[in-house]
């Protein structure tokens, strides 16, 4: 017999936010890893939207609030702070990379720092999802 798992609306919103944050962070990671390679192969690609500072700012505007909301809602469900370590480190690295992009880090430094931040963010959201699922599936819930 299948167990019926009831989740409240807040749990569903938190899960959805974690999934959105993973997708956005993954998009950022793919873009950051692919852009330097594409720039080497086709110099015209860097003239497009992916090379624009506005694109990075838009991604940051999406990533920061979605991630903070997902981590906060997840923490309210599972009370486990472990996912905050990679998650907040990832957010900090992505923000620092965006702020120091052209002037200090250069293209390669920015791509590396942003990629590391993206991997850490994805790890934090994955941990958040896993802990949330464990709590939802626990017998005492």
Image (tube, rainbow, N blue to C red):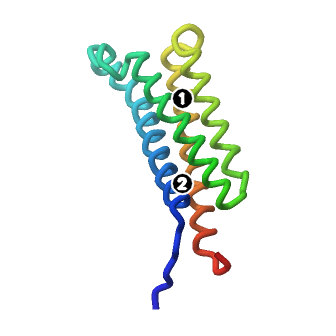
Residue 65: x and y, percent? Answer: 54, 36
Observer-nearest of 106 and 23: 23
Residue 133: x and y, percent? Answer: 57, 66
Could you tell whether 81 is left or right of 66 in the image? right
Observer-nearest of 47 and 17: 17
- The tag on residue 135 is none
Circle 1 packing at 10 Å, graded few (<14), some (14-19), many (20+), is: many
Could you tell whether 114 is left or right of 51 in the image? right
Residue at the image point whose x is 51% and y is 76% from the top: 5
Circle 2 packing at 10 Å, graded few (<14), some (14-19), many (20+), is: many
Image-quadrant location for residue 27 = top left
Q: Is residue 1 above or below residue 51?
A: below
Residue at the image point whose x is 46% and y is 86% from the top: 2
Image-quadrant location for residue 8 = bottom right
Residue 67: x and y, percent? Answer: 56, 41
Q: Pointers 1 and 2 in contact (CB under 8 A)?
A: no
Disc 2 marks which residue?
14
Residue at the image point whose x is 52% and y is 33% from the top: 115
For label 2, the SS is: helix
Residue 120 appears anywhere in the view? no
Could you tell whether 4 is left or right of 42 in the image? right
Numbered disc in front, either 1 or 2: 2
Q: Dividing the image into 4 quarters, which one contains the C terminus?
A: bottom right
Disc 1 marks which residue?
114
For label 1, the SS is: helix
First in sequence, mark 1 or 2: give its number.
2
Q: Is residue 40 above or below residue 94?
A: above
């Amino acid at each position: 017999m299948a167990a019926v798992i009831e989740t409240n609306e807040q749990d569903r919103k938190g899960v959805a936010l974690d999934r959105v944050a993973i997708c956005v962070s993954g998009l950022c990671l793919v873009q950051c890893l692919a852009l330097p390679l594409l720039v080497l192969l086709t110099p015209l690609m860097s003239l497009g939207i992916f090379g624009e500072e506005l694109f990075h700012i838009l991604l940051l505007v999406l990533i920061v609030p979605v991630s903070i909301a997902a981590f906060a809602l997840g923490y309210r469900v599972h009370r486990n702070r472990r996912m905050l370590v990679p998650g907040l480190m990832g957010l900090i690295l992505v923000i620092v990379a965006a702020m120091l992009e052209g002037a200090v880090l250069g293209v390669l430094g920015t791509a590396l720092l942003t990629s590391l931040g993206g991997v850490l963010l994805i790890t934090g959201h994955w941990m958040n999802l896993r802990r949330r699922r464990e709590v939802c599936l626990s017998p005492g819930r």
